[in-house]
């Protein structure tokens, strides 16, 4: 009976020693997995920031497009005014030339 206890104890020690590299490998894998999770969280946070920045850029682009459309409309009106003045000047020049 005492020999069985010694044999069991010896067997446990051998198994524990043999399993030590497996435990170390598992610990290493778990740490790597935790690092990957942390990295993934950082990537997700970065992606959210990029998406938010993209939305802001899209909003800014819409504002710029409206501004450009307004400027084009104003420029058309200015050219109409210039043409009116040009016609008046031509008419005055014609009167003077007669």
Image (spheres, helix red, strand yellow):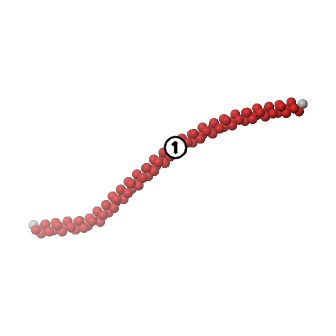
| Residue topped by disc 1 | 56
- Residue 82: % across, % down: 75, 35
Rendered image quadrant of residue 19: bottom left
Name of the residue lying farthest toward the front: 96
Tell me the residue at 54%/41% (across/down): 59
Rendered image quadrant of residue 32: bottom left
Total number of numbered labels?
A: 1
Crowd rating for badge 1 (residues with CA inside 10 Å; few <14, some 14–19, many 20+): few
- Residue 27: % across, % down: 31, 61
- Along the horizontal axis of the image, is 3 left or right of 64? left
Tell me the residue at 83%/31% (across/down): 92
Residue 82 against residue 10 in the figure, above or below: above
Tell me the residue at 30%/64% (across/down): 24
Tell me the residue at 15%/68% (across/down): 7
Of 5 and 51, which appears nearest the observer? Answer: 51
Judged from the image, the secondary structure of the residue bearing numbered disc 1 is helix
- Residue 56: % across, % down: 52, 43
- Residue 73: % across, % down: 66, 35
Name of the residue lying farthest toward the left: 1
Name of the residue lying farthest toward the right: 98
Of 15 and 39, which appears nearest the observer? Answer: 39
Rendered image quadrant of residue 72: top right
Q: Quadrant of the C terminus?
A: top right
Residue 95 against residue 43 in the figure, above or below: above
Q: Quadrant of the N terminus?
A: bottom left
């Amino acid at each position: 009976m005492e020999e069985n206890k010694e044999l069991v104890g010896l067997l446990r020690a051998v198994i524990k020693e043999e399993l030590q590299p497996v435990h170390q490998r598992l610990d290493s894998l778990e740490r790597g997995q935790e690092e990957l999770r942390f990295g993934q969280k950082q990537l997700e946070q970065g992606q959210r920031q990029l998406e938010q920045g993209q939305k802001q850029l899209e909003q800014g682009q819409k504002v710029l497009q409206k501004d450009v459309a307004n400027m084009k409309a104003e420029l058309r009106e200015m050219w109409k005014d210039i043409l009116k003045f040009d016609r008046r000047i031509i008419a005055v020049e014609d009167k003077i030339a007669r």
